[in-house]
Amino acid sequence: MRFTMILGITALIANTNAQSPDPLPTRSQQPISHGELIPISDRRDLIWDRHRSRLYITTETGNLERFDAITRTMMDPWKVGDSLLGADITQNGQDLFVADALNIDDAPQVRKVNLDTGEVSTLTFPPATNEGRPWDIKIITDTKGFITTDFQGIGTVPLREFNITTGSFAIREDTPGSSVSKIRGKSILRRSADRSTVFILEADISSGPLITYDRTTDAFITNSNTGKGWNRLAAASPTGDALARMYWGAVEIRDRALELTNDVEDYRGGPIFDPSRPLLYIADENSGEIVAFETATYQERFRIQVGEAMFAPAGFDEGIMATAHDGSLLFLSTIMGVRLYELTGLRAERVEDFTDCMAGPDSPPSPLMPEIDVADCLRWFDINADGDVDLRDAASLILSFAAN
């Protein structure tokens, strides 16, 4: 027997690391709840700010939209550029670097946004022949990031490293791309949450080339032609030991060396790893559901209704996801905007899991199943947050079922 996923009442997200918070939001809006829509139809990239508990949404109109997860409301947007694409936040949470699709005097534009004040400065670099707009950005260290660009047509471009302090750019001549020291235009960057690993997914080529970059050695440690179709959407695991990649027919899992370890067949959509649980989410366009898989076996665990129809995702389109750093919230870009899903109070879906965890009042769980530990039991089933799993938690669980 399988449980439906239970969504507990969402607690306020801790904001202990916030720096100089902005004034209270001025937009008049009711708080956005589970499954509801953040109505930003021209959304592109999604970036979570763990320092302020906010989601940033880059947009086609050049606005940086800001969603406050504490109040569950939209803040006033900041006008950052002309047409925004990929973005990433610095480790200290001070700045957001954003690719702007507008090239001024043939110079690609990268916007640096101070997240305390909204002040915007612009970085530029001289483009290569037929090189177009900036496309995707990832910040790797306190001083360094990567940026990919578009090609005016179909072709290859340099991968650039940039210094986030000085604003200088340098071509990485050691990039093992599909062309000599170059990668395809519109290539996707995906980094691990710990910033130890960056995966580069080359675009607009049927062989689906992939590259792994290692921060410790500052080197590209492996590259592979998957031979399995165009790269679409992807996600790096929190520690960089796995890459989930959507291609034409399914989602596949590869390790850091880009060896294929699993194929999640019959599911097509954007993936993301849960930062605090061993789960992979796929926004499946076939079923219109977000499907969760256990990462040890990639067996399905539960489903969440998206709330609207899904279509074939690609680039900065529907299917892009983001999570809060503690796994309490999941965000999904859709045709209509960005949807919010509350994962606080996430529970396992099997009766036997609860039975294995239940030990009685004031007794810590002692599960026998090898795939479950004490922390799992408390995270899943200690609904009353009193350090045990007992009949009082079972009663609260039943009430949660009744409410959902």
Image (spheres, rainbow, N blue to C red):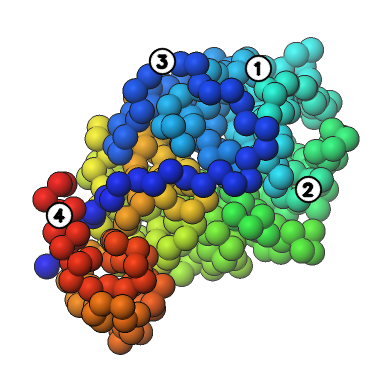
Q: Is residue 245 left or right of residue 112?
A: left
Q: Are marks 4 and 2 in contact (CB under 8 Å)?
A: no
In the depicted view, which residue is nearer to us: 403 or 243? 403
Residue 67 visible in the displayed image: yes
Residue 9 image position (x, y, % from top left): 30, 46
Q: Is residue 41 above or below residue 245?
A: above
| Residue located farthest toward the bottom when viewing the structure as drawn | 368
Label placed on residue 399: 4
The three-letter code of the residue at mark 1 reads Gly
Q: Which residue is the site of mark 2?
A: 142
Does label 1 or label 4 sit earlier along the sequence? 1
Calculate the distance from the C-alpha at mark 1 to the C-alpha at mark 4: 48 Å
Q: Is residue 163 left or right of residue 363?
A: right
Calculate the distance from the C-alpha at mark 2 to the C-alpha at mark 1: 24 Å
In the depicted view, which residue is nearer to us: 243 or 55? 55
Q: Are marks 3 and 2 in contact (CB under 8 Å)?
A: no
Q: Nearer the viewer, mark 3 or mark 1?
A: 3
Q: Nearer the viewer, mark 3 or mark 2?
A: 3
Q: Residue at x 36, y 71 (%)?
A: 387
The three-letter code of the residue at mark 4 reads Leu
Q: Residue at x 29, y 62 (%)?
A: 384
Does label 3 or label 4 sit earlier along the sequence? 3
Q: Which residue is the site of mark 1?
A: 81
Q: Residues within 10 Å of mark 4 (few under 14, many from 20)?
A: few
Calculate the distance from the C-alpha at mark 3 to the C-alpha at mark 2: 37 Å
Q: Which residue is the site of mark 3?
A: 28
Does label 2 or label 1 sit earlier along the sequence? 1
Residue 349 image position (x, y, % from top left): 22, 64
Q: Is residue 282 above or below residue 107?
A: below
